Amino acid sequence: MGTGDANMDHVDVIVVGAGISGIGAGYHLQDKSPDRSYMILEGRADMGGTWDLFRYPGIRSDSDMYTLGYIFEPWTEAKAIADGPNILNYVKRTAAKYGIDKHIRFNHQVKAASWSTEDARWTVTALHEGSEVQYSCNFLFMCSGYYNYAKGHRPHFEGEESFAGQIIHPQFWPEQLDYAGKQVVVIGSGATAVTIVPEMAKKAAHVTMLQRSPTYVVSRPSEDAMANRLRGLLPTKLAYALVRWRNVLFGMYFFNAARKNPAQAKERVLAMLGEHLPSETIAEHFTPRYNVWDQRLCLVPDADLFDAIKAGTASVVTDTIAHFDDTGIALTSGKRLDADIIVTATGLELQLLSDIALTVDGEARDMAKTFNYKGMMYSDIPNLASSFGYTNASWTLKADLTCAYVCRLLNTMKKRGMRQATPRIAGDLEPAPFLDFSSGYVTRAMERFPKQGNKQPWQVHQNYLKDLTALRFGSVDDEMEFSNPVPRAEIGTDRREPVSA
């Protein structure tokens, strides 16, 4: 007998996560595989994922909404670089418009998933209101993002216990924090830091961004003038598609040009900074040691960070921390920064598949020992896919492609009368890191992540056109084993006739 429980709720597909990826998955399942039943398990009390979790001042996208938005649901707001509440409303409106919200079960934190080959079934265990509950499905689609919601990256600083003010991590922002007239130090120089600094500078006495080393920062208008004009001239979906493709192609061109000619790319970015800041400030605080796109570029809308620096309400210090004391931070250079509030914008803690316990036929699977298949599935693990976006472009571009491919796979299985799809490695495969990116949050986690290979379909691309071609038009049979379950009693059964004595 298999692991199936007649009393357990069963659907064809379980989607884990009701953020921007999970809501997109619900739409694609309804649109492309309408015969498949599905549910979405969400660990929190509301949908939205990142855009519901993060509440720090100025929370916004660091990509334009024409590429961060869904391919099927046009972004129609005036601002292309949108704030967090507007993005959250967009996700919620989309879920309600297509009835996806009716498929969500909130406060279900998935803890484990167990695959049975005998039943071609995943049993998913979740924590709900303090008790374990179980659901089953034929296909498991992980859309829960790539970082730990419960824990950010937060190094310990010597002497921090003696600091008399507040120390805050952006992932857990206090709802009623009053920083008006306060001296604020923001530790970090990534996307979160460059978002928080200009916003807090509007009310704080002064905000200092303290960084160990510089990051590439570029300014972009928050409103896309061409997009807003086209929306008034063309049908909404056509205008959205044209702007989306323009932004995709421009982003790819700039990324590839930067990789091909890094010196020229660096010169161009620094020249753009020269329109806003003096050369000595650029040289000291905005000229990284690494090449453009070795790490993700930081985007600031309408030069807000640079304007705050020029206005004197914000400043940048490039130094390292010696220790905290009761009134601020002592730096290794001998200088010090007084502070009432210290914000540790020190990064995310990357996490794969929500760190759930994964077993296949009773055997625990270490994901670090697997290879990633087409950027979404894993070697020798049946009927499991995950949504993981781009590091050099909008997350949702890859999420949409992944959702469409999962539906294509499900439809192929149905057409062929097969219930299992398992990526299998054919021949030798040389391992490489899952992501080729030097950002600290990436390098800290890569040993826990699957590997990518040195050939197709085991390579992870950061290229929308390559993925679009491969996932929409490439073969679904490429190193993919389609099969049906074999009853356990038939596995290894000796069917020979007995020999007479």
Image (tube, rainbow, N blue to C red):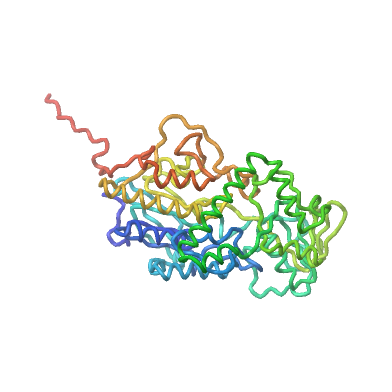
Residue 324 on image: x %, y %: 79, 59
From the viewer's perspective, tell me whether residue 206 is left or right of residue 400.
Answer: right
The residue sitting at 63% across, 64% down in the picture is 222
Q: Nearer the viewer, residue 366 or 441?
A: 441
Question: Is residue 329 positioned above or below 205 on the image?
Answer: above
- Residue at the far front in the pictured view: 233
Question: Is residue 306 positioned above or below 175 on the image?
Answer: above
Q: Quadrant of residue 30?
A: bottom left
From the viewer's perspective, tell me whether residue 357 is left or right of residue 77.
Answer: left
The residue sitting at 40% across, 42% down in the picture is 474
* Residue 34 visible to the viewer: yes
Q: Nearer the viewer, residue 260 or 88?
A: 260
Residue 198 on image: x %, y %: 72, 66
From the viewer's perspective, tell me whether residue 439 is left or right of residue 363.
Answer: right
Q: Nearer the viewer, residue 419 or 367?
A: 419
* Residue 163 visible to the viewer: no
Residue 3 on image: x %, y %: 31, 52
Q: Nearer the viewer, residue 351 or 433?
A: 433
Figure quadrant of the C terminus? top left
- Residue at the far top in the pictured view: 501
Question: Is residue 295 positioned above or below 160 on the image?
Answer: above
